[in-house]
Image (cartoon, rainbow, N blue to C red):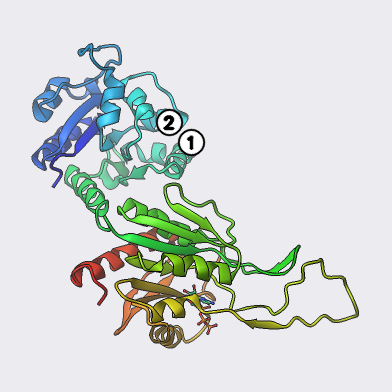
Amino acid sequence: MLKGKSIILGITGGIAAYKGAALCSKLVQAGANVHVIMTESATKFITPLTLQTLSRNPVYIDTFDERDPAVVSHIHLADHADLIVIAPATANAIAKLAGGHADDMLSTTLLAATCPVLIAPAMNVHMYEHPAVVHNLELLASRGAMFIEPGTGQLACGYVAKGRLAEPEDIVLAIQSWFDSGSKLKGKRLLVTAGGTMERLDPVRYLTNDSSGKMGFALAEAALLMGADVTLVAGRTTAAPPAGVKLIRVESAQQMLEAVTGLYDDMDIVVKSAAVADYRAVQISDHKLKKNGEKLVLELERTTDILETLGQKKKQQFLVGFAAETEQVEQYAMDKLRRKNCDLIVANDVSKEGAGFNGDTNIVQVFGEKGLVAALPLLSKREVAARLLDLIAARLASSGGKRE
Ligand code: CTP
């Protein structure tokens, strides 16, 4: 239900604007307080009176039509919205938002808003596939906008193709599930480790690995969206960490061990996606090593296995490990799960195209105490993170908030 949620419904000027009425009605029925903003072109397709009657609120069209001297309408609306939905979003509305234009009430409110924005595009298929539109959609996605893909079917222009506004009931479902997911991990303290560790040999040289930190960062970002209180312990990474988390930077496996064990007692969920060095140099030279002879033999010693240490101390924590494998994935993953006392192990076959280090995608299998829990197809690391956290939240909920 959407009780107590304040939603701005932006209706722009395409033929699907008439579906904005059904969407408005369904949002109100679901309990939302809906404020409709229409563009001038949208009023050519559907009357503001229809939307005012359905939303039981005044409809905004003109930025300068200020009715309440106590507030500046576009700022007031933007400040109080939990979500802005643009449905239908025309190619022009999308371009204006991507370009940061503010020449009417909707675009001005969008610039003033800090809440999430959900865009439901609707247009002719060739317009939807035009490189300019594709570029604008990508740009908006990179800024965090969410989308409801248009459907395929009979378009008003005569084509049977992709471009139809998603059905109002599907848009409402997406909105509901987005609000639900915002509370799935509410109140949970979650610790994620990300990136690779660096084991110094001398002041200018070190041993490390190919980890970019992307998987761990995606997990931290998805956990934030689900309402968790997120602490991120990150080693060497090439990707930028997400905003809004408590970030602790470390270098070596030993530093990561100390940071993580110091935080462990207070955590509800710990996800160890970092690629931790298994060995470090026995001697770290405090001056730059000089070349000397044809061969150099490095003596390495085992680092402490952080995940195993956490597994031994586990109380209320739900513990999730990662396993990068190239063969016998299930056997090795199950072995790690038991040896390190984890609740779940996320295994990826790093020999597969699209899985593992550095890329933006991953293919993972998740194992629990009784074996395979989920086998996910090739997905973006963001999507893998969301699915994995869904699984964790479901397991925590079914065990009454405690680890099984
Ligand atoms: N890990 C850790 N501390 C280490 C090494 C690994 O916490 N010193 C964690 C990783 O963060 C990951 C999991 O252990 O969650 C699996 O890492 P992996 O290197 O695949 O495990 P190993 O048991 O070292 O595997 P292998 O026997 O294949 O070397």
- Nearest the eye: 97 or 202: 202
User: Is the C-beta separation of discs 2 and 1 under 8 Å?
Assistant: yes
Nearest the eye: 222 or 156: 222
Neighbours of disc 2 within 10 Å: few (<14), some (14-19), many (20+): some
Q: Position of residue 136 (x, y in %)?
A: 45, 37
**Can I make out residue 41 in this image?**
no
In the picture, the disc for residue 132 is 1
Secondary-structure class at tag 2: helix
Q: Residue at x 27, y 39 (%)?
A: 155
**Residue appearing at x 20%, y 72% in the figure:** 399
Q: Residue at x 37, y 41 (%)?
A: 125
Most foreground residue, 290 or 380: 290
Between disc 2 and disc 1, the foreground one is: 2
Picture quadrant where residue 384 is located: bottom left
Residue shown at 91% from the left, 80% from the top: 293
The picture places residue 176, in percent across and down from the top left corner, at 20, 48
| Amino acid type, residue under disc 2 in the picture | Ala
* 27 left or right of 162 in image: left
Name which quarter of the figure residue 299 lies in: bottom right
Q: Which numbered tag is attached to residue 95? A: 2
At label 1, which amino acid type do we have? Ala
What whole-number distance in Å separates the C-alpha atoms at marks 2 and 1?
8 Å
